[in-house]
Amino acid sequence: MIKTDDYCFVCGKQNPKGLKAVFIHGNGRSQAVIVLDKEYQGYSGIVHGGIISALLDEACVYAANSLGYNTVTAELKTRFKKPAYPGETITVEAQATQLKSKLIEAKAWIKNSENSIIAEAESKLIIKEKTR
């Protein structure tokens, strides 16, 4: 089993500098609702693209792992559509499907409170081990 210590930057509850996103996941899907603080901005008043990419990646992993595997990201392609702003509520979602015995593909997206897509991603994840 892949070792975790609750210090994941995106979802770890023990990481004092992390995002502490809480993902609901199951049946190849995941979702988190989060408000990002100003400390995660790049340009003044805009959330850093790396933070957005990290959220998309995490959503893909949660969706893939909910299929009963521990996975790691092999590839992540991100497309930015609109800026995310500190203090706004955003929703991160993903859906995953198993392609081959060792590969899962996932798609993720982030929407703002007006239901507009901020960014989307496609991911390929390598299955490390079965968990169920």
Image (cartoon, rainbow, N blue to C red):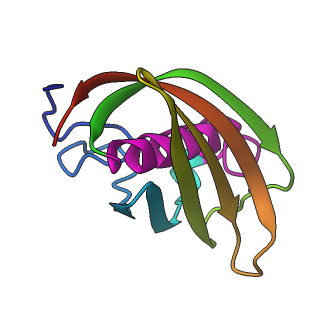
Instruction: Locate residue 117 relative to residue 122 in the image: left or right.
Output: right
- Residue 77: image location, x then y, percent: 72, 29
Tell me residue 101's x, y (percent): 41, 23
Q: Nearer the viewer, residue 79 or 90?
A: 79
Give the main secondary structure, helix, strand or loop, of the magenta stretch. Answer: helix
- The mark total stands at 0
Residue drawn at (63%, 62%) of the image: 86
Q: Position of residue 85 (x, y in %)?
A: 71, 62
Q: Residue furthest right?
A: 81
Q: Any magenta on residue 57?
A: yes
Which quarter shows the C terminus? top left
In the displayed structure image, the side of residue 6 where residue 89 appears, left or right: right
Residue 92: horizontal and vertical position, in percent?
56, 60
Q: Nearer the viewer, residue 67 or 19?
A: 67
Residue at horizontal 21 percent and vertical 52 percent from the top: 13
Q: Is residue 123 magenta?
A: no
Residue 19 against residue 69 in the figure, above or below: below
User: Observer-nearest residue: 110 or 12?
Assistant: 110
Q: Quadrant of the N terminus?
A: top left
| 27 left or right of 16 in image | right
**Which quadrant would residue 80 be assigned to in this image?**
top right
Please, is residue 106 above or below residue 29 in the view?
above
Q: Nearer the viewer, residue 103 or 54?
A: 103
Name the residue located 39 percent from the left edge and 60 percent from the top edge.
27
In the image, residue 36 sits, relative to residue 3, either above or below, namely below
* Magenta residue span: 41-67
Would residue 81 be found to the left or right of residue 111 on screen? right
Question: Residue 42 falls in which quadrant of the image?
Answer: top right
